[in-house]
Every structure is written in structure tokens, then in C-alpha cells.
Amino acid sequence: MSNSEFYPLIAPKKDGLLALESDSWILAPIKTLGNYLEVYSLLLSTAYNHRIYLDLSAGTGMLEMNNTGECIYDTSLLAFSSPVQFNRYIFWEPNETYAQALRVRIKRNFKDKNVLIISTSWEKFLEQVRNYVPINTKGIKPWIFCNVNPRFGFPEIHFFDSIESLDPVVFFTLAGEKKKFWTKLKSGKDDFELYARNHIRNIEKWTYENNFRIKGSFSLTESSKMNSLYYQGVLCRKANVSKVVTEVRRRSSNQIQLF
């Protein structure tokens, strides 16, 4: 798998469990996540002998496109197809109904994987997750890839403060539903683009102050539900992310359109 292109979109049949609705814009962050995992499988040092996939707002594991009816795996189940061989998968999903559907799907199809699903408040999750992440000691070198699902919303600075000690690589997407953001912003003074760009500047300041690096870009998409502008980025401490991001962008521009 590591020597081939990684096409993450899998169209399973409906399985009778809850699938969250989305529209086609979600394919962009899912494809990009797949490309990051492919690139890291090629560039990640073999010294990392304990690899953990951390998915925040993991959902039910499956999405149904409201414009086509097609089903695809969400980011949580996508990770099981990753060419990166993870030792453990940790999913945080605060909605217990969503978490239960995810548990059943994993039990049915991925029961051989080392999976932990936590459905609790963010604060309690942070208390628990540190018990499952090994400390970097002699003989143990952990690598944590953290995907922040777009459902998580805009990660605030205190979010990065709370996971900083885990020393993760973080892939995140900033995107807003039109109605939600237009109701929270002041009419005539602010808009989504200004809000998003200011937010990125705050994150960039945080990375500089905490010895992390960030790389990402804004893109446009056509969607009836989401604002047309969204941001995808990755930040980490261990290495310069420019080489990884450059390769991801190259692959993304050549990505086969599966739908």
C-alpha cells in the first residue's frame, strides 16, 4: 500500500446503522486526510514504534451524501484503511448515540483493531486519554496523528493548549455552516472570511510561541449548507511540515475523482 496512491473514499452499502448526513463538500477534507496519511507513511521515521490515531468528533463512522444518497466512510473508519500502521485508534465522540453506532460498525468490521471509543465531555476525555498514550522513554517513541473532524468546529487556542503535551501532528479543517455563522457574527461588521482569517492568525501566533509549525491554505467549494471558504492545515512540533504539505498538494491536484 505504501508504494501506491491512497484513494480513501470507500462506498459501502447501507448497513442499517445511523449515518450522518453531509453534502459533497466533505469529500475535500476526507480526501486530504487520506493524502496526509499516505504521505506520512512514506516520510515518517521508522523510529516511531508506537503510532496512535486520534479522531476528535469521530461521528458514526459513515456519512450519507444528501445530494446523491451515496455512503462513504467518515474519517474515523477511513483511518483503518491508512497505509500508516497504527498501534491504537482513539475516538472521541461526545454524542453517545453517534458513539454507539461507531462501536457497532467497528465491532462488525474491524474487531481486530486496538480501538478505544470515549463518549464524555471534552474535559473528562483529556483526563482519560493521557492514560492511553505512552510517554516518550527509552525504547518507546510515540507518534500521534490527530484528526479534528470538521464537526468539531473552530478549535480555539485553549484546545491546542490542552493537547500540546501529547505532542501530536494535528490535521484540521475550519469550515462553517452558513446559518450558524451568520447568526453569531455582527451584521455589516464581520463576515465568515474575516472571522476565519483572524482565527488562523491567532493559531499561527500560538504555534510560534509554543515551538510548533503550521502550514495550510484556504480553498473554495460549492455547497448549499457550508460557507464557500474553508481552511485546511496541519501543525506539528517534530519536523518542518512544508515537505509533507507540498507532497499532499501535489497528490491532491492529481487525485482521481471517485464520485
Image (tube, helix red, strand yellow):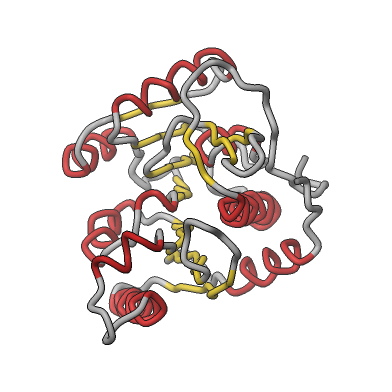
Q: Which quadrant of the figure has residue 207?
A: bottom left
Left/right of residue 164 with respect to residue 121 in the rendered view: right
- What x and y, as percent, mark residue 76? 50, 36
- In the image, taking residue 53 as reference, residue 125 lies left or right, namely left
Q: Residue at x 42, y 35 (%)?
A: 59
Q: Is residue 202 above or below residue 178?
A: below
Q: Between residues 97 and 31, which one lies in front from this camera angle?
A: 97
In the rendering, at what x and y percent does residue 71 appear? Answer: 63, 33
Which residue sits at x=26%, y=80%? Answer: 187
Q: Quadrant of the N terminus?
A: top right
At x 61%, y 56%, the residue is 28
Q: Nearer the viewer, residue 103 or 239?
A: 103
Q: Is residue 44 visible?
A: no
Q: Which quarter of the picture shows residue 244?
A: bottom right
Whether residue 234 appears in this view of the structure is: yes
Give how far across and how far down residue 225 sits, in percent. 48, 56
State the count of labels.
Answer: 0
Q: Depth check: 162 or 141 in front?
A: 162
- Say if 148 sits above or below 228 in the image: above
Q: Seen from this angle, which residue lies furthest bottom?
A: 189
Q: Residue at x 40, y 34 (%)?
A: 90
